[in-house]
Image (tube, rainbow, N blue to C red):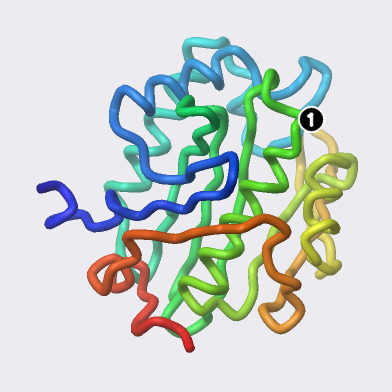
Amino acid sequence: MITDHWPLRGLRVTTPRLELRLPGEEELAGLADVAARGVHPPHVRPFLTPWTTLPPAERARHVLQLHWKRLGRWSPRHWALDLVVFHEGRPVGFQDMRAQDFAVRREVASGSWLGLEYQGLGIGTEMRAAMLHLAFAGLGALSATSVSFSDNHASLAVSRKLGYRPDGITRDTLDGRVVESRRLRLWRADWPGSPVPVTVTGLTPACRELLGAGEAPP
């Protein structure tokens, strides 16, 4: 079985409405279709990497290639867990969780997107809450970080709702101009817990080893 060689295939994070997990190939294609239909209005640029401004076919291909690239480069010291978000059995978006030297730093970063047709339903908050539960309750992370453009009000609102606090700013260039991003951090000690019930299954010792997580947290 594939989980004998890649135990992350068996990892599931579920909430009352959502399931987050690695996708099969056809499910990944379904996620690419969602991206091709659009993840934000044309006048908005929420990401520093301009993949969402590509033509639909190239946008879909980017989703596939990024997923494969991250799996191919995986190591317990440097990983990116790309969880596809399923709602009513269909892929609707993407929630990642990334770490470097997690065994030492116990810190994760995250990013996400939702198809336009699934926005405004509270799914963004629920899927981030599920990821935080996996990080804190499942892996024993000490902190989680997020970075959003200062005008990305939807993402910043999700972070505030879940307890993140300001952690400085970053300044980058986008289309020849400077853009400012807000860094945010949530410490495990300040985590209020998920606002929705979350269940994690498949977090086996072999799975934890691939994540550099060691033994289960107390």
Q: What kind of element bears circle 1?
A: loop
Query: In the figure, residue 44 lies in which quadrant?
Result: top right
- Across and down, in percent, residue 158 comes to 79, 50
Q: Is residue 52 left or right of residue 69?
A: right
Q: Residue at 75% of width from left, 32% of height from top?
A: 121
Amino acid identity at mark 1: Gly
User: Please, is residue 15 above or below residue 198 in the view?
Assistant: above
- Across and down, in percent, residue 195 comes to 73, 59
Please rate how many residues cluster around mark 1, counting C-alpha atoms within 10 Å: few if below 14, some from 14 to 19, many from 20: few
- Across and down, in percent, residue 124 comes to 69, 41
Residue beneath disc 1:
120
Q: Looking at the image, which is closer to me, 80 or 124? A: 124
Q: Residue at 12% of width from left, 57% of height from top?
A: 4
Q: Looking at the image, which is closer to me, 39 or 194? A: 194
Q: Residue at 57% of width from left, 10% of height from top?
A: 55
Q: Is residue 41 left or right of residue 7?
A: right
Q: Residue at 58% of width from left, 55% of height from top?
A: 130
User: Please, is residue 152 above or below residue 7 in the view?
Assistant: above
Q: Is residue 190 left or right of residue 133?
A: right
User: Please, is residue 173 above or below residue 93 in the view?
Assistant: below
- Across and down, in percent, residue 146 comes to 70, 58
Q: Is residue 134 left or right of residue 166?
A: left
